[in-house]
Image: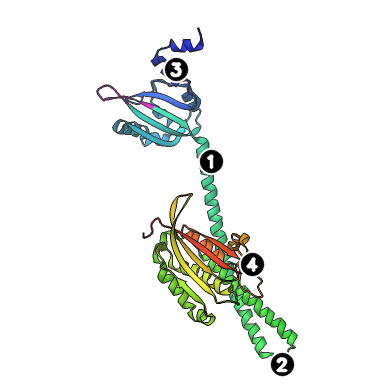
Amino acid sequence: MSDNEKFLTVGSEAQYHLMIGEVEDYAILMLDRGGIIRTWNRGAEKIKGYKEEEILGQHFRIFYTRVDQEEGLPERLIGEAAEKGKAIHEGWRARKNGTKFWGSIVITALHDEQGNVIGFSKVTRDLTERKVAEDRLLQNARQLAAQNRELQQFAYIAAHDMKEPLRKIQTYMDAVLSETEGVLSDRQRKWLAKAAGSSQRMQGLITDLLAYTNVTEQSALLEPTGLGDLVGEVFSYQSETLEGMGAVVEIGKLPEVAGVSFQLMQLFTNLLSNSMKYRDEGRVLRISVGVERVRLTPPGDEFYKVSFSDNGIGFPPEMKDRIFNLFERLHGRENYPGTGLGLAICKRIMENHRGYIEAEGRPGEGSRFYLYFPLEGFSQ
């Protein structure tokens, strides 16, 4: 008789019990109405450590920690299964040898033909490896967050404490330059002027560092913010300078988004300053701001895509990601002063608003920045 023929000679009920009994990855057992263990399989022995002969007739609370037993968790679970048909739970469970494992359990009520509960099936899976990995990731994330907070606090304090001595250096430099005219040689005064210029650049760097460290996660502060009024206000602050340049500005109808107003003000101020700084002296500066709704896949969510473009000197396409790095400079300080932090701040602000920023550019053709604000939670 073949193995297949031998298997077919076994009744369907026996086949079922044979199948359950041989499963090793899951502990599968039956309980009576009171929670007493009536059946045991190989997986239960492997996971929990008990032999069939020493566990049958015991209450299944034996698998729970002392705290869970004192709080009545096992009884609550079979009570929930009796009432709702099923109970699902994850938690630490106890093996025979006293060690713990993270068990995922499903208790299902069994009924007779009249619908009365006559017992329960209980399936347990050992997910200890997954739980340990998740806890390790969570711990690492907490440590990283704590280190970031410490680093951010250190950077803020260091930058803040450097402002006052630098201010004094600038004051003394200015005093020396004003009182030594005709006393020091032109070369000496040139050296002092360069030193004063260096301290001013350092002052600007510190100011930008303070701004960068102050742009922290503030999702809880997000509130409806009209970009139209906000962007209009940013441009109005620079209206005299823009008029002096003869700049042409076009601002489309912008939406209302969930945002932190002062951060968005800083965002658009930095973009505008960027366009003004890197304008092409050979043509009239043109700046345009517009918006469209887009669906991005993945993840398939809808965004407001706000574009901020100019016709300035532009930048090489291969630099489109690097320009958002801290202290990244594409042009010499002699012609284009700055600290290399402006666009890094823009990137951080967009991340705080659950969005992101992209850039396009070509030398001599200008730059275009795309700001993606998620529509979820925004006005439609």
Query: Is disc 4 in contact with disc 1, using a CB cutoff of under 8 Å?
Result: no
41 on left or right of 340: left
The magenta stretch is: 110-121
Which residue bears the numbered disc 1? 133
Residue tagged 4? 330
Task: Locate the C terminus and report the quarter of the image it occupies.
Answer: bottom left
Q: Which residue lies furthest to the bottom in this view?
A: 182
Which type of secondary structure does the marked residue at label 2 adopt? loop
Residue 18 numbered tag = 3
Q: Please tell me which of labels 2 and 3 falls first in the chain.
A: 3
Question: Which mark, by number, is residue 227?
Answer: none
Q: Nearer the viewer, residue 322 or 246?
A: 246
Whether residue 214 is visible here, answered yes or no, is yes
What amino acid is found at the position of numbered circle 3 in the picture? Leu
Task: State the separation of the CA atoms marked 3 and 4.
Answer: 72 Å
The residue at the point 42 percent across, 18 percent down is 17
Q: How far apart are marks 2 and 3 (CA)?
A: 106 Å
Q: Is residue 80 left or right of residue 219?
A: left
Nearer the camera: disc 3 or disc 4: 4
Q: Three-letter amino acid code at disc 4?
A: Leu
